[in-house]
Image (cartoon, helix red, strand yellow):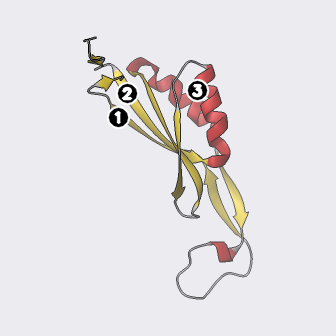
Amino acid sequence: MSAQGKTEQPGQKLLIIIASDADADILIRKLVDRGYPATKVSSTGGFLRRGSATIFSGVEADDTDNVLAIIRTECEARTEFVPAQALPFPGSIFPTEPVEVRAGGAIVFVVPVERFERT
């Protein structure tokens, strides 16, 4: 490490995890309890425009599979029934019954870290 806090970290990965708000707090607690850093940023979007969280976690490359296993356990996909009016159907034709949709789960991007700097 140099005097300015710069380090070369070719063996690190940045995981960018997009999860539902319902799963995010539990996921962060599990990651931190196991010694993995996690930073949460609130976000919205997706099919149902529900609250979501983007979680950043920088880990050693060898720990990537362990972190992914935690994510799979805590962010399981599930089905929910939502009112048809809540769905983004074009025009004014809506089904009259609630619609079954996939909810939960997570999207994970694993990005190599070229450089890590702590100030």
- Front residue (pair 107, 117): 117
Identify residue type, mark 3.
Answer: Leu
Residue 46, percent from left and from top = 52, 60
Q: Is residue 4 visible?
A: yes
Per the image, the residue denoted by label 2 is 13
78 relative position to 64: left or right: right
Q: Assign a secondary structure to mark 1.
A: strand
Q: Which image quadrant is residue 12 in?
A: top left
Identify residue type, mark 2.
Answer: Lys
Relative to 47, say whether 55 is above or below.
above
64 relative position to 94: left or right: left
Label 1 close to label 3 by CB (< 8 Å): no
Per the image, the residue denoted by label 3 is 31
Identify residue type, mark 1.
Answer: Val
Q: Is residue 75 visible?
A: no
Which residue is pictured at 53% across the width and 57% down the height?
Answer: 44
Label 2 close to label 1 by CB (< 8 Å): yes
Q: Assign a secondary structure to mark 2.
A: strand
Residue 29, percent from left and from top = 64, 29
Residue 79, percent from left and from top = 68, 56
Which image quarter holds the N terminus? top left
Residue 42, percent from left and from top = 55, 48
> What is the CA distance from the residue labelled 1 to the residue labelled 3?
18 Å
> What is the CA distance from the residue labelled 2 to the residue labelled 1?
6 Å
- Front residue (pair 36, 119): 119
Relative to 110, say whether 93 is above or below.
below
> What is the CA distance from the residue labelled 2 to the residue labelled 3?
15 Å
Relative to 89, say whether 41 is above or below.
above
Per the image, the residue denoted by label 1 is 111
